[in-house]
Amino acid sequence: MFVHFSHSRATRLADTCATASTPAAHTWKGMGRRRTAICSTSILQSASLAALLLQIAIFTALISKVYSACDILWCSYQYEADTDPLDPGPYPDFCRALQRYQRCVDRISPGSCRGDLHYHSTKTVIPDLQRNYECERVLREENNPGPTRAVETTTRPSRNGGDNDSDSPGTNGRPPFFPDILSDAPETGGSQRCQYTGSRSFRHCGLFGDPHLRTFDDLFQTCKVAGAWPLIYNDYLTAQVTNVPLVHGSGATATNKLTVIIKPFRDGECAQRKLYQATAGNLPTTFDDGTITSGREEGVVIIEVIPGEHVEIHIRYIATLIVIRQVGRYITFAVRMPEELIQYQGAEDMQLCVKGCPVSEQIDYATFLSQTTRADRNYKELRVDAIAKCRKAKIYDEYLDSCVFDLLTTGDANFTQAAKSALTDVNRLHPNASFLFKNRTSVFENASFPGYRDIEGGAPPRTYLFHHLQFNLAMVLFSILISSYMSSWCHIQR
C-alpha cells in the first residue's frame, strides 16, 4: 500500500513537471525579461529518487527499531553468563538465574518480537524449567527456612567436586533467617526492627581495574585517584579504597586496599560498629574482631563465596549488598544500595560512587586506545592481541574498553578477569542491567562521539546506528519536501 502510494505520488510529480516543460511553459508572455522555467528533467529524477529513498529509509528504520526493541538475545546471553558456572537442578542459585531470565523476558514488549521464534519458544521454556526444578518450592524454603533448615545447610554439587564453586552466595555462614536481599520476596524471621521497609529502588556502583568506576548515576570513568579515596559515606556505613600506581609515568593505579566500616544501628540491636579490611593478598572472611555477624539480631553478615577470591557483606536492615573480590594482586568493589539511602554531601562531596572522579583525576582512555605507534614496542600488534583476549572472555561495552586499556597499560592478564568479574557484578546488582548494555564487541576511540572510528572492527553500538539512521531519514524527508515545493511552484508558473 505504501509503495503504491509513493509511486503514484512520484508519477504525478513527473506528469506535472512534464506538462510544465512544454515550450509554452518556457516563455514568459508579457513585458519584461524572458523567464526560463526551472522545472528540468534533473528535478523530476530527483523527486522520483527521493520518493524511492524515503521508502527504503522508512523500511530500514522499522527493521532497526524492531531489532533494537526485541532484546531476547541479550536476555539469553545474560542467562548463559549467570548459569555458566552452575549445574542445572533444584538449587537456589540456579532458580534465581531462571527468575532473572523470566523478568528480563517479561520486560520485552511482545509487539517488538512479533514473528521471532526464539522469543516465543523462550517464553514457553522458562516456566517449564521452573516447574521441572521445583523453583517455587526451592526459593520459598530458602526464604522461609523451617526448623530443619535452621541447622542443616544444603549445598548443590560442584562441577569440580567441591562443596560450592558457584559465583553466587551460598548458605555457609548465613544465619537461618537471613534472606536474599536482592529477592523481591518479603523478608521473614529476625527482628522486625532490623528489616528494611523503604523503597526498593536501587542503585549500583563498582570500582575495578586501573581503576574504572561506574557511579550510582551510571557515569563510567577511568581515573588515577592515587592514595586513599572514599567510595561511600553515610549514616550507615563508610567504604574507602587505597590505590597505588601501576606503571611509572602512566598515571594508572589499582586498588590494593579496601576498608568498610559498619556503623551502629538501633542501639546495637541490628548492628554494632564493625571494621572490615581487605588488602592485596589477604581477603578476610571476618571482621577485624574475628566475627562474621554484627548486631544482636545479626543484621549484618559476611559470606565467603569463593575462598581467597570472593566475599560479600549483606546488610539486611538497609537492603545493601557489598561484593569484594581479589583478582591477582588487586581488589575490586561493587555495591547495590537503595536509592533513598545515598547521601549527597554538597559541593565538596568526595564520594567516588556519588560524585565520580574529579576532572583532574580522570584519564582519557579513548585517546590512549587510539594510538597507533609507540617508540618502545609494536603498539598496534599489542592492541590487536589485547582485544582478542578480552573478546574471548566475553566482555563487552565499556568493560571491553577497560579490559583492553588495562592489558595495554600493565600487561597483567589478571585485569581481564577483573573486567569480567565487574561485568558479572553489574549484571547481578544493577536494577536495570537488561537495558544497560548494547553488546558492543569492538573498541572505540570514543563511542559517544558521532565521529568515532572503530578500532579493529566489531559490532558498533546500536544506539549510534539508530541515531545515524534517523539523521539520514530526516535528510531524505527534507529532500522530498524541497522537490515537492519546486514541482508545485513550477506548476503554478505554468
Image (cartoon, rainbow, N blue to C red):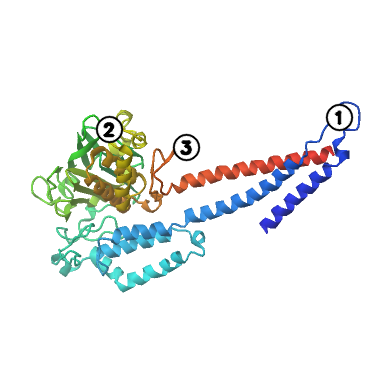
Question: Which of marks 1 and 3 precedes in the sequence?
Answer: 1
The amino acid marked with disc number 2 is: Met
Quarter of the figure that contains the N terminus: bottom right
What residue appears at the point 33 percent right and 39 percent down from the top-left corner?
Answer: 380
Comparing 13 with 233, the one in front is 13
What is the residue that sits farthest to the right in this orientation? 30
The amino acid marked with disc number 3 is: Gly
Quarter of the figure that contains the C terminus: top right
Disc ID at residue 451: 3
Disc ID at residue 489: none
What is the residue that sits farthest to the bottom in this orientation? 132
The residue wearing badge 2 is 350
Dot 3 surroundings within 10 Å: few (below 14), some, or many (20 or more)? few
Secondary structure of residue under mark 2: loop
What residue appears at the point 44 percent right and 57 percent down from the top-left corner?
Answer: 71
Q: CA distance from mark 2 to mark 3?
A: 33 Å
Position of 46 relative to 434 (above/below) = above
Q: Tell me: 53 left or right of 149.
A: right
Q: Are marks 2 and 3 in contact (CB under 8 Å)?
A: no
Dot 2 surroundings within 10 Å: few (below 14), some, or many (20 or more)? some
Residue 247 in picture, x, y percent from top left: 21, 34
Secondary structure of residue under mark 3: loop
The amino acid marked with disc number 1 is: Arg
